[in-house]
Amino acid sequence: MAIKSISLIVHRTLDVKNWLLRPPTAKEARPGRCPRCHCASRPAGGALGLHGHGQRDRQILGPPEVNSASTMTIVACRRYLCTACGAVVMVVPRGVEPRRHYGRAAICLALALWALAGQPTTVVRTRVCAWPGRETTSWRTLARWAAAIAAGIWPWCRAARGLGPRAAAGRAAQIAAGSAPPMTAVPIWDLAYAGGAALI
Ligand SMILES: [Zn+2]
Protein backbone atom coordinates (compact mmCIF):
# COMPACT_ATOMS: atom_id res chain seq x y z
CA MET A 1 0.00 0.00 0.00
CA ALA A 2 1.42 3.40 -0.91
CA ILE A 3 2.05 5.85 1.87
CA LYS A 4 0.35 9.14 1.06
CA SER A 5 1.48 11.13 4.05
CA ILE A 6 2.36 10.72 7.68
CA SER A 7 -0.27 11.76 10.20
CA LEU A 8 1.06 13.31 13.37
CA ILE A 9 -0.53 12.71 16.75
CA VAL A 10 0.59 14.56 19.86
CA HIS A 11 0.75 12.36 22.95
CA ARG A 12 -1.83 13.39 25.55
CA THR A 13 0.39 13.28 28.61
CA LEU A 14 4.10 12.89 27.85
CA ASP A 15 6.10 16.05 27.19
CA VAL A 16 9.56 15.99 25.61
CA LYS A 17 11.38 15.80 28.94
CA ASN A 18 9.37 12.84 30.25
CA TRP A 19 9.48 11.09 26.89
CA LEU A 20 13.29 11.27 26.96
CA LEU A 21 13.44 10.08 30.58
CA ARG A 22 11.44 6.97 29.80
CA PRO A 23 10.52 6.49 26.15
CA PRO A 24 7.08 4.86 25.82
CA THR A 25 6.82 1.37 24.34
CA ALA A 26 4.86 0.75 21.15
CA LYS A 27 1.98 -0.47 23.30
CA GLU A 28 2.04 2.54 25.63
CA ALA A 29 2.07 5.20 22.91
CA ARG A 30 -0.44 3.47 20.59
CA PRO A 31 -3.27 5.90 19.71
CA GLY A 32 -6.87 4.83 20.34
CA ARG A 33 -7.80 5.07 16.70
CA CYS A 34 -6.40 5.91 13.29
CA PRO A 35 -6.57 9.68 12.72
CA ARG A 36 -7.37 9.16 9.04
CA CYS A 37 -9.97 6.36 8.85
CA HIS A 38 -10.95 6.37 12.56
CA CYS A 39 -10.58 2.59 12.83
CA ALA A 40 -10.11 1.42 16.42
CA SER A 41 -6.49 0.51 17.10
CA ARG A 42 -7.42 -2.27 19.56
CA PRO A 43 -10.90 -3.53 18.61
CA ALA A 44 -12.37 -5.79 21.29
CA GLY A 45 -11.66 -9.39 20.34
CA GLY A 46 -10.16 -8.37 16.98
CA ALA A 47 -6.72 -7.94 15.47
CA LEU A 48 -4.72 -4.80 16.10
CA GLY A 49 -5.74 -1.97 13.77
CA LEU A 50 -2.57 0.07 14.31
CA HIS A 51 0.59 -2.00 14.15
CA GLY A 52 3.87 -0.78 15.63
CA HIS A 53 5.92 0.50 12.68
CA GLY A 54 9.23 1.27 14.34
CA GLN A 55 10.64 4.54 15.51
CA ARG A 56 11.70 7.67 13.72
CA ASP A 57 14.08 10.25 15.13
CA ARG A 58 12.84 13.79 15.24
CA GLN A 59 15.07 16.77 15.91
CA ILE A 60 13.84 19.39 18.33
CA LEU A 61 15.78 22.65 18.44
CA GLY A 62 15.95 25.12 21.29
CA PRO A 63 17.08 25.29 24.92
CA PRO A 64 16.22 21.99 26.70
CA GLU A 65 15.72 24.02 29.92
CA VAL A 66 14.63 27.64 30.00
CA ASN A 67 18.05 28.94 31.06
CA SER A 68 20.30 26.48 29.24
CA ALA A 69 22.08 26.95 25.94
CA SER A 70 20.13 26.16 22.81
CA THR A 71 20.88 22.82 21.22
CA MET A 72 19.41 19.99 19.18
CA THR A 73 17.57 17.23 21.02
CA ILE A 74 16.78 13.94 19.32
CA VAL A 75 13.52 12.25 20.25
CA ALA A 76 12.70 8.75 19.01
CA CYS A 77 9.03 9.05 18.03
CA ARG A 78 6.75 6.04 17.67
CA ARG A 79 5.24 5.07 14.33
CA TYR A 80 2.21 2.91 13.56
CA LEU A 81 0.76 1.47 10.40
CA CYS A 82 -3.00 1.35 9.99
CA THR A 83 -4.02 -2.05 8.59
CA ALA A 84 -7.34 -0.62 7.35
CA CYS A 85 -6.23 2.42 5.33
CA GLY A 86 -2.44 2.15 5.11
CA ALA A 87 -1.80 5.42 6.92
CA VAL A 88 1.47 5.82 8.77
CA VAL A 89 0.85 7.53 12.09
CA MET A 90 3.61 9.12 14.10
CA VAL A 91 3.15 9.84 17.79
CA VAL A 92 5.24 12.72 19.13
CA PRO A 93 5.52 14.17 22.63
CA ARG A 94 3.75 17.30 23.76
CA GLY A 95 5.73 20.41 22.95
CA VAL A 96 6.50 19.37 19.38
CA GLU A 97 5.26 22.01 16.95
CA PRO A 98 4.24 20.18 13.78
CA ARG A 99 6.25 21.18 10.71
CA ARG A 100 8.70 23.30 12.75
CA HIS A 101 12.26 22.49 13.73
CA TYR A 102 12.02 24.29 17.06
CA GLY A 103 10.07 22.96 20.02
CA ARG A 104 7.04 24.93 21.15
CA ALA A 105 8.70 25.82 24.48
CA ALA A 106 11.60 27.48 22.63
CA ILE A 107 9.23 29.25 20.26
CA CYS A 108 7.14 30.61 23.14
CA LEU A 109 10.29 31.70 25.00
CA ALA A 110 11.44 33.65 21.94
CA LEU A 111 8.00 35.20 21.42
CA ALA A 112 7.83 36.34 25.06
CA LEU A 113 11.36 37.77 25.09
CA TRP A 114 10.74 39.66 21.87
CA ALA A 115 7.12 40.77 22.10
CA LEU A 116 6.52 41.01 25.87
CA ALA A 117 9.95 41.82 27.31
CA GLY A 118 10.95 44.01 24.36
CA GLN A 119 14.31 42.30 23.85
CA PRO A 120 16.11 43.04 20.57
CA THR A 121 15.98 40.26 17.98
CA THR A 122 19.73 39.74 18.32
CA VAL A 123 19.38 39.01 22.05
CA VAL A 124 16.46 36.64 21.46
CA ARG A 125 18.41 34.85 18.76
CA THR A 126 21.46 34.43 20.98
CA ARG A 127 19.32 32.76 23.60
CA VAL A 128 17.04 30.58 21.49
CA CYS A 129 18.68 29.95 18.11
CA ALA A 130 20.49 26.62 17.91
CA TRP A 131 23.05 28.17 15.52
CA PRO A 132 23.39 31.73 16.82
CA GLY A 133 26.45 32.47 14.67
CA ARG A 134 24.69 32.01 11.36
CA GLU A 135 22.80 35.27 10.98
CA THR A 136 24.05 38.53 12.34
CA THR A 137 21.47 41.29 12.07
CA SER A 138 18.09 39.60 12.10
CA TRP A 139 16.48 36.29 12.82
CA ARG A 140 14.10 35.35 10.04
CA THR A 141 12.88 32.32 11.98
CA LEU A 142 11.33 34.60 14.62
CA ALA A 143 9.63 36.70 11.94
CA ARG A 144 8.24 33.51 10.35
CA TRP A 145 6.76 32.36 13.66
CA ALA A 146 5.12 35.76 14.19
CA ALA A 147 3.72 35.66 10.65
CA ALA A 148 2.34 32.12 11.19
CA ILE A 149 0.60 33.25 14.38
CA ALA A 150 -0.84 36.38 12.76
CA ALA A 151 -2.14 34.18 9.94
CA GLY A 152 -3.88 31.88 12.44
CA ILE A 153 -1.97 28.77 11.33
CA TRP A 154 -1.36 27.31 14.80
CA PRO A 155 -4.55 26.10 16.52
CA TRP A 156 -3.34 26.78 20.07
CA CYS A 157 -2.95 30.52 19.45
CA ARG A 158 -5.67 31.14 16.92
CA ALA A 159 -6.93 33.96 19.16
CA ALA A 160 -3.98 36.04 17.91
CA ARG A 161 -5.07 35.77 14.29
CA GLY A 162 -5.29 39.05 12.41
CA LEU A 163 -3.07 41.04 14.77
CA GLY A 164 0.17 42.64 13.63
CA PRO A 165 3.21 40.34 13.89
CA ARG A 166 4.54 41.65 17.21
CA ALA A 167 1.11 41.92 18.82
CA ALA A 168 0.30 38.40 17.61
CA ALA A 169 3.57 37.11 19.05
CA GLY A 170 2.79 38.77 22.37
CA ARG A 171 -0.72 37.33 22.48
CA ALA A 172 0.60 33.83 21.72
CA ALA A 173 3.23 34.17 24.45
CA GLN A 174 0.49 35.17 26.91
CA ILE A 175 -1.63 32.17 25.89
CA ALA A 176 1.36 29.89 26.48
CA ALA A 177 2.16 31.53 29.82
CA GLY A 178 -1.47 30.97 30.85
CA SER A 179 -1.00 27.23 30.25
CA ALA A 180 2.03 26.94 32.52
CA PRO A 181 1.76 24.94 35.73
CA PRO A 182 1.66 27.16 38.86
CA MET A 183 5.06 28.82 39.37
CA THR A 184 5.93 31.69 41.65
CA ALA A 185 8.29 34.62 41.16
CA VAL A 186 9.38 33.74 37.66
CA PRO A 187 9.43 36.12 34.69
CA ILE A 188 6.72 35.91 32.03
CA TRP A 189 9.15 34.30 29.53
CA ASP A 190 9.79 31.41 31.95
CA LEU A 191 6.02 30.89 32.13
CA ALA A 192 5.74 31.04 28.34
CA TYR A 193 8.48 28.38 28.03
CA ALA A 194 6.80 26.07 30.56
CA GLY A 195 3.38 26.60 28.98
CA GLY A 196 4.74 25.97 25.51
CA ALA A 197 6.17 22.63 26.65
CA ALA A 198 2.81 21.60 28.11
CA LEU A 199 0.40 22.80 25.42
CA ILE A 200 -1.25 20.16 23.24
ZN1 LIG B 1 -6.56 4.09 9.07
Image (tube, grey):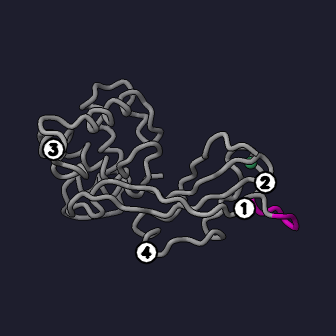
**Which mark's residue is nearer the viewer, 4 or 3?**
4
In which quarter of the view is residue 149 placed? top left
Q: What residue type is labelled 3?
A: Ala
For disc 3, the neighbor class at 10 Å (few under 14, some 14 to 19, many from 20) is: some
Within 10 angstroms of label 4, few (less than 14), some, or many (20 or more) residues?
Answer: few
Q: Name the residue under label 1.
A: 51
Inspect the image, locate mark 1, and give the three-letter code of the amino acid beneath it.
Answer: His
Q: Which of marks 2 and 3 is nearer the N terminus?
A: 2
Q: Mark 2 points at which residue?
A: 83
Q: Name the residue under label 3.
A: 117
Q: Nearer the viewer, mark 2 or mark 3?
A: 2
Looking at mark 2, is its residue's CB closer than 8 Å to ligand 1?
A: yes
Secondary structure of residue under mark 1 = strand
Residue at 77 percent of width and 63 percent of height: 42
- Nearer-N-terminus badge (4/3): 4
Amino acid found under the numbered disc labelled 2:
Thr
Q: Nearer the viewer, mark 4 or mark 2?
A: 2
